[in-house]
Amino acid sequence: MTFDPDKIALDEEEQWIEDNLEGFVPAPEWVGRSLHEAARATMDDMRSAKKQISINVDGKVIAYFKELAAETGVAYQSLINMFLVQCVNEKKRPVFA
């Protein structure tokens, strides 16, 4: 089977880019370097801010986040951390029943 780029259906945004391609101007090299450096600094900050811990978690919690990981392609440990960060940012408190 051969690849035929003319038979690929583009979404609305992709089609707009294709239709307006001649209006795009290549970004200067320093822009790419700056973006790369900013992304690297952000990732380094995130790595250094994390602390490894050991906690006991209900099996259903792990199962839930592993299922979510399978759906999203994000590691379940990262999903748990993302959720906890949201709790901190929104100052959520546990409900004691």
Image (cartoon, rainbow, N blue to C red):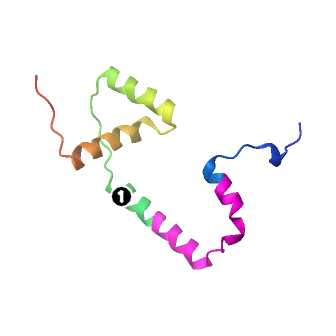
Q: What secondary structure is marked by label 1? A: helix
Query: Is 49 in front, or is 74?
Result: 74
Q: Is residue 67 above or below residue 54?
A: above
- Relative horizontal placement of residue 55, taking residue 67 as reference (left or right): left
Type of residue at label 1? Ser
For disc 1, the neighbor class at 10 Å (few under 14, some 14 to 19, many from 20) is few
The magenta stretch spans which residues?
15-40
- Which residue sits furthest right? 1
Q: Residue at x 70, y 65 (%)?
A: 21
Location of residue 79 (image quadrant): top left
Residue 27 at x, y percent in the picture:
61, 75
Q: Quadrant of the C terminus?
A: top left
Residue 39 at x, y percent in the picture:
47, 63
- Relative horizontal placement of residue 54, taking residue 27 as reference (left or right): left
Query: Is 21 in front, or is 3?
Result: 21
Q: Residue at x 66, y 74 (%)?
A: 26
Asked whether residue 48 is drawn in magenta, I would say: no
The main secondary structure of the magenta stretch is helix
Callout count? 1
Residue 63 at x, y percent in the picture:
39, 23
Which residue lies under the disc numbered 1? Answer: 48
Q: Is residue 3 above or below residue 71?
A: below
Q: Residue at x 53, y 67 (%)?
A: 36
Q: Is residue 75 above or below residue 64?
A: below
Location of residue 25 (image quadrant): bottom right
Location of residue 64 (image quadrant): top left
Q: Is residue 62 above or below residue 36?
A: above
- Relative horizontal placement of residue 42, taking residue 33 as reference (left or right): left
Q: Quadrant of the N terminus?
A: top right
Residue 11 at x, y percent in the picture:
64, 46
Asked whether residue 36 is drawn in magenta, I would say: yes
